[in-house]
Image (spheres, rainbow, N blue to C red):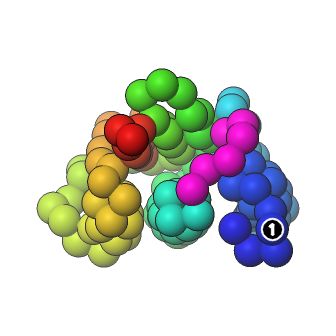
């Protein structure tokens, strides 16, 4: 990450700044411990930035819940909001960009949304076998 910061430090800083700027509360459930390879960290940050931009522009949310964990299965990211929800469109715009960033590092992305109940963006980057 930039300036020698870990992914967890970069996420904490970005989430705090975003929450202060937008007035949308952020609940952080988990941040990654230890090192995350730089290519994966950059892709995760890009997905987080796009997901938060979509929350800010479209959701009407009051709160975003956020978690990034690293375990035996790899890295798992979840960003959920309590906004208006939407009908998930085909591969366009922000969703297509997030999916492409995950594909670059061998990961996958899913978006689940229910109108009136919010949206959840989930990404998984499997642990690579050595």
Residue at 75% from the left image edge and 56% from the top image edge: 6
Q: Is residue 104 above or below residue 115?
A: below
Residue tagged by mark 1? 4
Task: Give how far across and how far down residue 24 sits, in percent.
Answer: 72, 53
Left or right: residue 31 compared with residue 68: right
In this view of the protein, which residue sits in the foreground, 115 or 99?
99
In this view of the protein, which residue sits in the foreground, 99 or 54?
99
In this view of the protein, which residue sits in the foreground, 129 or 43?
129
Name the outermost residue toward the top.
72
Task: Give how far across and how far down residue 102 sits, in percent.
Answer: 36, 58
Q: Is residue 108 above or below residue 71?
A: below
Overall secondary structure of the magenta section: loop
Residue at 49% from the left image edge and 39% from the top image edge: 75
Residue at 35% from the left image edge and 38% from the top image edge: 129
| Magenta stretch, residue numbers | 32-37
Res. 80 visible in picture? no
Residue 33 lies in the magenta stretch? yes
Residue at 50% from the left image edge and 58% from the top image edge: 40
Q: Quadrant of the rendered structure where residue 48 is?
A: bottom right
Label 1, residues with CA under 10 Å away: few <14, some 14-19, many ≥20: few
Q: Quadrant of the rendered structure where residue 82 is?
A: top right
Task: Give how far across and how far down residue 9 sits, in percent.
Answer: 80, 54
Residue 124 lies in the magenta stretch? no
Could you say whether the residue bearing mark 1 is in a helix, strand or loop?
Answer: helix
Left or right: residue 27 compared with residue 88: right
Name the outermost residue toward the front.
130
Task: Give how far across and how far down residue 72 sits, in percent.
Answer: 48, 25
Left or right: residue 30 compared with residue 23: left
Res. 26 visible in picture? yes
Locate the N terminus by quadrant: bottom right
């Amino acid at each position: 990450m930039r300036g020698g910061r870990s992914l967890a430090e970069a996420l904490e800083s970005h989430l705090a700044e975003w929450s202060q700027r937008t007035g949308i509360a952020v609940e952080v459930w988990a941040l990654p411990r230890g090192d995350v390879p730089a290519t994966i960290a950059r892709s995760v940050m890009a997905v987080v930035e796009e997901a938060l931009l979509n929350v800010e522009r479209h959701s009407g949310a009051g709160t975003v819940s956020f978690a990034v964990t690293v375990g035996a299965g790899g890295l798992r990211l979840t960003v959920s909001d309590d906004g208006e929800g939407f009908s998930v469109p085909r591969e366009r715009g922000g969703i297509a960009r997030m999916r492409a960033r995950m594909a670059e590092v061998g990961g996958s992305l899913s978006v689940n949304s229910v109108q009136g109940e919010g949206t959840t963006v989930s990404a998984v980057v499997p642990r690579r076998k050595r």
